[in-house]
Amino acid sequence: MIQQGDVVILAGKVKGKKLNHLTLALGEATGHHHTITKGDAELYENNGVLFLKVNSDKATLTHQEHKTVEIPQGEYKINIVKEFDHFSEEARNVQD
Amino acid sequence: MSKIDKLTPKQEKGLTEWREHCLNIGRDTSPINKDLTEKSWKKFYQILGKKEPVFWYCQSPLQAQIVINIFPEIVKIFEITDKGANIRANIWANIRANIWDNIRANIRANIRANIWANIGDNIRANIGANIRANIEANIRANIGANIGDNIGDNIWANIGDNIGDNIRANIGDNIRANIWDNIWANIGDNIGDNIRANIGDNIRANIWANIEANIRDNIKKMKLNYIDTYSWCQHDIGWIAYYKYFEKYGLLPNDKNFDIFDIWHDLACSCGWCYTFENIIFVCEKPCKLYLNNQGQLHKDGAMALEYSDGYGLWMLNGVKVTQELIETKAEDLDPSIILKEQNAEVRREIVRKIGIERVCQKLKTKTLDIDGEYELMLLDLGDERQRPYLKMRNPSIQTYHIEGVEPNIKTVDEALNWRNGTTERPEVLT
């Protein structure tokens, strides 16, 4: 398992529809984004969950503040970390 | 001709030299160079076979959005003033004062009506009825057709498609044919990507998002439209710097493509954002104040991080958009409990950073439930007689603290991380 900030990358079979971008998460307050910037990779979406397929030996995941991460060839499920809002009493993905 | 596979010492030095030079262009807060701006745009319009444009100067992109939206009405007034005495400057001052004050007061519902009423009063006070009628009949149809009605004929796409993409493709082919990939990538990393990240992501994107939000959420209620542009001029420097490096440092010969490219470079050096239309270009000033942290992110505690001369600007801490109140309130006067209701994690991080993690814990923490390495599970006082668990953690990349709520029944750091990450696995790599 690999984690870059709010993005958790777990081994998992790719499914869903192929997307035409490689941004795993986008920050609202900063415009910062977790994006594959090097390597051959494909991003898929299935029922709101993202899946990543790395075709090359490795792909580079970058973010403006977090250190760069190398993701080895393989198929992955992308989780966005959760937090609990005790005022609305509901869980939600962390928004940045 | 063999491809270039090694940079000369001068070219190598130029990577940082040129990068710093271009970053300074993107961050420049000096006054607009009107001569160079107009000369450059006229060249572009000539290339496109377009009529020479007139120029309308705005203090900020947000002001430009408003002016463009009401421009058909302004044109009528503007032409009236040309026929009258020296009212042109007064009219503009009046428009600016009345529009901008209202906009800054957060866009009251009747702004449009107010502007028209103010301008109308001014006309009625200064222009006789017979002249008004005459001008209405003679000017409205004429100028309206040439400027007012054509305002919708935005040619930014024309400029982008006909000049930008074409030139970029030509120079790109030239680069690929003559320079080996490793050198190309090196230049891309050092010049293009770096400046794009510093200027494009940190500055341009923030202004764009802020303006769009202002228009979309506020002004749109008055049925004004968001006006798009691809002419960011000063903030286009990222891609300009990249291509121009090849010519400037002798990797590629100067040719007609670079001559055209130089027009863009001149615009980047001379002005802020531009909105290009048939016959008219709205040119914005550059920001007059710009503050950055040592990471190159927009940052200023106590004032706007980026400000235009009309007062429009961005309130930002370490690259994160926050409220004016957070910026202007002294850390010791801020109530730490505001972090509990803030939904955005990055904003929350900046609140913690400003107030200080110690004071946040001192004010809100009632008990430590568990500690594991850099993680601490704490019970925080919600201020309504409830105490709920929050996970305190340190960002391993930038060493700042985050506080995030976890499910009420969680008792340990381990349970908190399992729930937060959606897995019982622990990261082999964490940044």
Image (tube, rainbow, N blue to C red):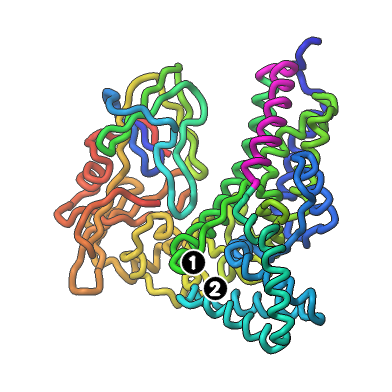
The Cα–Cα distance between marks 1 and 2, rounded to whole angstroms, is 8 Å
On screen, residue B200 versus residue B127, left or right, reads left
Q: What residue is rendered at 84% in x and 50% in y?
A: B39
Q: Chain of mark 2?
A: B
Residue that sits furthest to the top in the current view: B1
Q: Which residue is mark 2?
A: B103
Foreground residue among B322 and B224: B224
Q: Quadrant of the C terminus of chain B?
A: top left
Q: Chain of mark 1?
A: B
Residue B174 seen by the camera:
yes
Where residue B198 sits: x, y (%)?
62, 46
Q: What residue is rendered at 31% in x and 32% in y?
A: A45
| Element type where label 1 sits in the image | helix
Q: Quadrant of the N terminus of chain B?
A: top right
Foreground residue among A53 and B11: A53
* Amino acid bearing label 1: Ile
Stretch of the chain drawn in magenta: B155-181
Above or below B12: residue B48: below
Q: Which residue is mark 1?
A: B219
* Amino acid bearing label 2: Ile
Camera-nearest label, 1 or 2 = 1
Magenta span includes B168:
yes
Name the dominant secondary structure of the magenta segment: helix
